[in-house]
Amino acid sequence: MNRWFTVLSPLAFIIIWHVAGTLGWLGDTPLPAEVAVALGNLLRGEDPFLGELLRIHVAVSLVRIMAGFALAALCGIGLGLAMGWFPTVQIVMRPILEMLRPIPPFAWVVLAILWFSTGNAPAIFITFLGAFFPVALNTTAGVEGVSPVLREAASTLGASRWDSLRMVAIPAAVPEIFTGLRIGLGVAWMSLIAAEMVGVGTRGLGLLIETSKMVWRLDYAVAGMVVIGLVGFFLDFLMRWWSGYLLRWR
């Protein structure tokens, strides 16, 4: 039954969209059929205004999200483990993180362009910022949440501080770490699209939507939004699958 709901809920959304658009409740918003035609044109590269094939924009955005997210995961997990396990590190780093965390990744666009000029580097930096803070803070919370009983048991059995971190704290914190990774991936994807929309990079799904708006092809803009949603859903599915596979011991 749940699988049927998984299929029927998007179909119901499309039907409601079509009915509301037909009745004029959505203004100039294109209908689902028009978006489907635009999506087909983008896949074939038949539009003279937008030029490049959709798959090129998708590929560029995917390269950026993977690079930025991988860096954020590496740095965020490393810093989070250090903050959660060593009080001194947390005393030093926590104020800095809490000051930088409320700044939206989008606000860093100007500095990213100044620091990294053009190309993929500014977009990867914005993506990194979007994922870094959720990963670091969730990892910290995961390590801090390890039961003191487990720590004492490891110490009683002769484990060193490093052994306790490696064999007790990290395995116990893995669920929290994956929660941070999943949240960070979603924030990073949204941050990347927003950065691409203001011209960070010469290709990408965000730029595709912005170009569509400039030539007033709303059907192409909405088609780009659909692709962004589908890619985001696929990335989240991969993260959930990976998490379920690695945490199957639970």
Image (cartoon, helix red, strand yellow):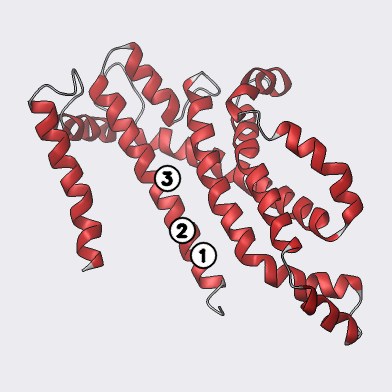
Q: Is residue 1 left or right of residue 63?
A: left
**Residue 218 pos. (x, y %):** 26, 20
Per the image, the residue denoted by label 2 is 238
Q: Alpha carbon of mark 2 to alpha carbon of mark 3: how far? A: 10 Å
Q: Is residue 220 visible in the rendered structure shown here? A: yes
The image shows residue 9, relative to residue 48, as above or below, that is: below
Per the image, the residue denoted by label 3 is 232
Q: Earlier in the sequence, mark 2 or mark 3?
A: 3
Circle 2 SS class: helix
Q: Alpha carbon of mark 2 to alpha carbon of mark 1: how far? A: 6 Å
Per the image, the residue denoted by label 1 is 242
Q: Tell me whether circle 2 and circle 1 mark residues in contact (CB < 8 Å).
A: yes
Instruction: Locate the N terminus and report the quarter of the image it occupies.
Output: bottom left
The disc labelled 1 sits on which kind of residue? Answer: Trp
**Structural crowding at the residue carrying mark 1, measured as other residues with C-alpha within 10 Å and reported as few (<14), some (14–19) or many (≥20):** few
**Residue 82 pos. (x, y %):** 82, 55
Tell which of 122 and 82 is nearer to you: 82
Q: Quadrant of residue 177?
A: bottom right
The disc labelled 2 sits on which kind of residue? Answer: Leu
The residue at 42%/38% (across/down) is: 58
Q: Tell me whether circle 3 and circle 1 mark residues in contact (CB < 8 Å).
A: no
**Structural crowding at the residue carrying mark 3, measured as other residues with C-alpha within 10 Å and reported as few (<14), some (14–19) or many (≥20):** some
